Amino acid sequence: MRIRAVSLDLDDTLWPIEPAIVAAEQALDEWLRTHHAPVAAAWPIAALRELRERVSDEHPHLAHDFTAQRLITLERAFAACGIGDQHVADAYEVYFAARNRVDCYADALPALHAIGAHVPLASISNGNADLGRIGLRTHFRACISAREYGIAKPAAAIFHAACDALGIAPGEVLHVGDDPWLDVAGARAAGLRTAWLNRGGGAWPDHQALADVRPDLELRDLGELARWIEAHAVAGDRAG
C-alpha cells in the first residue's frame, strides 16, 4: 500500500468512550442536584438517558449531531419542571466539559507522536469530542466531525471531506477505527485503505453486510499502527 496520510476515528480508538459518558452524566446530575434540585429529582441519570434516546428516535435528521440531541433533551427536562431554557446552555457545558475529560489508551499519545513524524493525520468522528479541549488538536492537520459536516460515517462523503482537507487522494489515506461497519466498510466504500483496531482480539463480525468486507490491516493497538507506518509510509508528507 502507498500510504501518505492516516485518518483516525476518536471514540473507542484513542480513548474508551463509555467511562467518559458515565462521568459526564454523573457530573450533570450533581450539578442539577446543586442548582436545580426539582429537575434532578424528576430526571435522574437513567430517566434522562431514556429521554435522550426518545429524542434521538424522534429526530432522525439529527442522527449525526449528538450535541443537538443533548440540548433538546435538556430543554425538555427543564420544561417538564416548568423551567424555561435559560439554564440549558450552562447544563450542557457541565456535561460537555466532563465528556471531554477522557483517559486516552496508553498507546494513543506515543502513537500520535510517532505517526505524525511520518505522515499527516486527520480525525473523522461521528461523536462530538473536542480535540482542543482534550489537548490533542495539534496532532491533526484536519478534524472532520459528523456534527460540523452534516453527514456521519459510514457515508463516503465524510471520508472524502477528510481526504480533501489533507489534499491527498483517498487511495493513499489509511483510515483506522474500531467499528467494522462505520470505519472499515465505510472507508473502504469511499476508496480509502483500512485498518481495523481490534483491541479485544475478537473475530470479524459474522454479518451478511460485512461478508465481502475485510480490512487491509488488523491491529491490536495503535503502537502496532505506528510501527507499520514507520516501515511503510511514503516519505515526504510530514505533518504540518
Image (cartoon, rainbow, N blue to C red):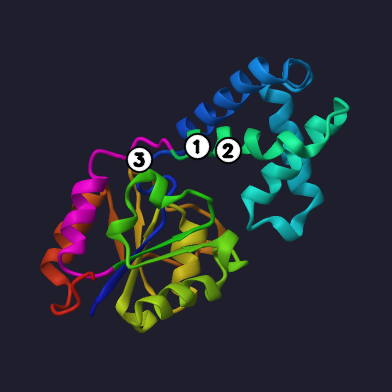
Q: How far apart are labels 2 and 3 at the CA level? A: 33 Å
100 shown above or below 227: above
Q: Secondary structure at mark 2?
A: helix
Residue 40 x %, y %: 72, 19
**Few, some or many residues within 10 Å of mark 2 (<14, 14–19, 20+):** few
Which numbered disc covers residue 200? 3
Q: Secondary structure at mark 1?
A: helix
Span colored in magenta: 101-120
The answer to if 87 sits in the magenta stretch is no
To which residue does mark 1 refer?
97
Whether residue 212 appears in this view of the structure is no
> Of 27 and 188, which appears nearest the observer?
27
The answer to if 116 sits in the magenta stretch is yes
Whether residue 41 appears in this view of the structure is yes
Give the amino acid type for the residue marked by disc 3 in the picture: Gly
Q: Secondary structure at mark 3?
A: loop
Residue sitting at x 26%, y 69%: 120
75 shown above or below 186: above
> Of 54 and 225, which appears nearest the observer?
54
Q: Is residue 210 left or right of residue 122?
A: right
Residue 182 x %, y %: 51, 60
Q: How far apart are labels 1 and 3 at the CA level? A: 28 Å
**Few, some or many residues within 10 Å of mark 3 (<14, 14–19, 20+):** few
